[in-house]
Amino acid sequence: MKRLLIDGKLVEGERTYPSRNPATGEVIGEAPDASKEQAEAAIEAARRTFDTTGWATDVPARIRGLDRLYEALVEHKEELRELTIADAGATRMLTHGAQLDDPLEIVRYYADLLRTHPMREEIGEIEYQGARHRRWVEKEAGGVVSAILPYNYPNQLALAKLAPALAAGCTVVLKAAPDTPLVTLALGELIAEHTDIPPGVVNVVSSSGAEVGELLTTHPGVDIVSFTGSTETGRRIMAASSRTVKRVFLELGGKSAMIVLDDADFDATAMLAAFTICVHAGQGCALTSRLLVPREHHDAIVAKAAAAMGKVRYGDPTHPKTFMGPLISERQRDKVDGMVKRAVAAGATLVTGGEKAEPGFHYAPTLLGGVDPDSEIAQEEVFGPVLAVIPYADDDDAVRIANNSIYGLSGAVHGRDRDRALAVARRIRTGTFSINGGNFFGPNAPFGGYKQSGVGREMGVQGLEEFLQIKTFGEPVT
Ligand code: NAD
C-alpha cells in the first residue's frame, strides 16, 4: 500500500480509500485518507524545516537535491509509467510525452536554472537628504508552499510546482488529487527513498475529501498556495486564503478557441482540431474545445472533423496504438454526457459520438455542430472529448466570440496569411497561443491564464519567481 510522506517518514493513513483504474473501473490500490492531524503534522514539518534548517539558503544542497530527484525519476520511469496509465487512465502513447517523459525534464530545467539565475540585482544609487544611497534587491525563498493538484496530469502538475518551489528554497506540502493519489504518493516514496532531500522539505498527502485541502489554504503556517484545478475551487481557495493573506497562485479552467480563418488549410485544421480534443479524452485545461469556423464553410469543416474523429483509436490505454483513453470516473462521464444532451436540447447538432463505452469510463469522441456561442456547451468547461463547432461571420466576429468567455487560458489560429493570423492571435485575451499548429509548451515556457483561468505563471523563469520573495536593501555610500 502507498504511504503518506510526513517529516521524512513514510506513514500509513489512519483510514484508506480505494483508487480505481478508469479504463476498467477496477480498484487498483488503497490510498491513505489523511486525517486533519496528519495534514497538520505535514504543514508543521514543512514550517519547522523552513524556519530552522539551512535549506532555504543552501543553494548547492538544492541543486544536488534536484539533480538526484531527476535521476531517481529517470531510474523509476517505467514503474511510474505503468502507475500513470492505471491510476489516471493516461494512454501509453501520452506517457511518452506530456503525461510522464516530458514533465521529468521540468526537474532538469530548474536544477540548471538554479545554477545561473541571478538572486541579486543592483538597482543603482539615489541622492537622499544630501547623501548618496546604494540600493539592491535580493531574492529569497517564499516560505512554506501548499501545492494542490487536480487529477488530469498528475506528473506534470506535481513537478511544475515542486521543482521550482525546491529551486527557490521553499518547503512543500503536496496534496494529491482524490482520483489519482497513487502516482503522487509514488513521487513521495521516490523522494524519501532515493534522494537526499532533507526530511520535512517535501511532504506528500492524499485524501478523499476537501477537508485537507481547506486546511492547506487556511493554516497560518502556510505562506504560498499553488493550486491547479477548477475555477470554482480556485475561487473558494482565493477567498479562504485571504484570511491570512497568503500569496495565491492559480491555474484554473479553460474554454479555449481554435479559430479557422477562411484561407486556412481546412483538411489539416479539421484533423488537428478533432485529434486535439481527444488528447487524454479532453481532460486538459488548455485544449481547444471550441472550433470557430467561417459560417459559409461550417458544413464542409464539420464533415472533415467528423471523418477525422472516426479515425481516433480509443479504448484500452495500455495498448501502444490507443490514442484516447477513458474519462477519470463515472461522475465525470455523467457530467460530460449530461452537457452533451443539454447542448443538443439547446439546438446544437450531434454529428458523431455522444455515447458511453464499456468497460470503465470511456466516452466516444463527440462532435457538435452549429453551436450557439452563448450556450452552456460553448461557455462551460466540459473536460471530455467534445468539440463544439461555432460559425462566425468575419475576423472581428471570430475575435469577439473567442473572447466571449470567463476563461482566458489558451487558443489557436489557422490561416495561410501569417500576418493576418498573428493579428488575430494578438487580439485574443489568453496566456498562451498557437499559430498554425505551433507548440508553445515546454519547461522554459511560462504557462497560465488571463481572466478566470488563473493568476500567475507556471514553468519558465516566471515559474521560479512565483516562489521567491523580494527584499530591497539600501545603505549610505561611504
Ligand atoms: P478540482 O477543482 O475539483 O480539484 C482540484 C484539487 O483541489 C483536488 O486536489 C481537490 O481535492 C482540491 N480541493 C477541492 N476543494 C477544495 C477546497 N475547498 N480547498 C482546497 N482544495 C480543494 O479539479 P479537478 O476536477 O481535479 O481537475 C480538473 C480541473 O483542473 C479543470 O477545471 C481543469 O481545467 C483544471 N486544470 C487546470 C490546469 C491549468 O494549468 N490551468 C491544468 C490542469 C487542470
Image (spheres, rainbow, N blue to C red):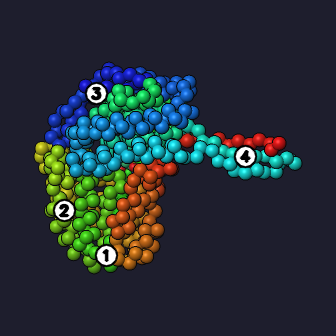
Residue 211 seen in the figure: no
The amino acid type of the residue labelled 4 equals Arg
Q: Position of residue 209 (x, y in %)?
A: 34, 32
The amino acid type of the residue labelled 1 equals Ala
Which element carries disc 2, helix, strand or loop?
A: helix
Q: Residue at x 24, y 56 (%)?
A: 278
Counting residues from the N terminus, which is met first, the one under dot 3 or under dot 4?
Answer: 3
- The residues tagged by marks 1 and 2 sit, at their Cα atoms, a distance apart of 19 Å
Counting residues from the N terminus, which is met first, the one under dot 1 or under dot 3?
Answer: 3
Counting residues from the N terminus, which is met first, the one under dot 1 or under dot 4?
Answer: 4
Q: Nearer the viewer, residue 151 or 231?
A: 151
Asked whether disc 2 touches disc 4, contact meaning CB atoms under 8 Å apart, the reply is no
Q: Quadrant of residue 297?
A: bottom left
Residue 264 image label: 1
- The residues tagged by marks 2 and 4 sit, at their Cα atoms, a distance apart of 60 Å
Counting residues from the N terminus, which is met first, the one under dot 2 or under dot 3?
Answer: 3
Counting residues from the N terminus, which is met first, the one under dot 2 or under dot 4?
Answer: 4
Residue 115 seen in the figure: yes
Q: Which residue is mark 4?
A: 135
The amino acid type of the residue labelled 3 equals Lys
